Amino acid sequence: MLTDREPELVTALEAAVARLSWSDSAAVSVAQYTWGDPISWDHAPPRGAGSVVDLVLGADCLYSHLTTSAFCDALDMLARANGFPPLVVLVSCEERQLTAECLEVAAARGWQSYLLETVTMPPMPTEASPATVRLLQLRFDRHN
């Protein structure tokens, strides 16, 4: 399931899925979703013997306390629905002034971050300096 809260981006995601013509396109759905809202399974893959959601990929979603908390709300709901095996969460985030604080917010909610890789990206045309991007795995630690 691919999601975004912005209708224009949802439309772009739908177009991308249609263009890619995956052999198992029925397993790829697109929905508008705002983190923290109740999860509607109307567009999700059918619940079967396996997990409802196996993998969450997030990009540029840890940039403020509010968005990090809402993202954790969504992860909490998915983790409860998923059961076992545990939900795998991979996130890329640009190193910003609040990145460390955002990771502390996630940790306080039980989502520990593990650095997988750090990459320096060339500057965007409108930027003066390169960006440092981290690839992280978030794992829920119920003992936190």
Image (spheres, helix red, strand yellow):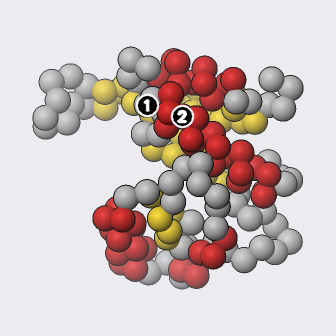
Task: Mark 1 and mark 2 in contact? Answer it, CB < 8 Å.
Answer: yes
Instruction: Measuring from the top left, give residue 63's x and y in whole percent.
Output: 43, 31
Q: Quarter of the image for the N terminus: give it.
A: bottom right
Q: Is residue 39 above or below residue 41?
A: above
Q: Nearer the viewer, residue 139 or 132?
A: 139
Q: Secondary structure at mark 1?
A: loop
Instruction: Measuring from the top left, give residue 138's x and y in whole percent.
Output: 65, 35
Q: Residues within 10 Å of mark 1 (few under 14, many from 20)?
A: some
Instruction: Measuring from the top left, give residue 72's x and y in whole percent.
Output: 63, 39
Q: Residues within 10 Å of mark 2 (few under 14, many from 20)?
A: many
Numbered badge on residue 63: 1
Q: Is residue 81 left or right of residue 35?
A: right
Q: Nearer the viewer, residue 1 or 34?
A: 34
Q: Secondary structure at mark 2?
A: helix
Query: Disc 2 designates what residue?
Result: 68
Q: Residue at x 43, y 57 (%)?
A: 5
Q: How many marks?
A: 2
Q: Is residue 92 visible?
A: no
Residue 104 appears in which quarter of the rendering?
A: top right
Q: Is residue 80 left or right of residue 97?
A: right
Q: Residue at x 80, y 23 (%)?
A: 144
Q: Amino acid at mark 1?
A: Tyr
Q: Residue at x 79, y 52 (%)?
A: 80
Who comes first in sequence, dot 1 or dot 2?
Answer: 1
Q: Is residue 10 left or right of residue 2?
A: left
Q: Amino acid at mark 2?
A: Thr
Q: Residue at x 45, y 44 (%)?
A: 59
Q: Is residue 51 visible?
A: yes
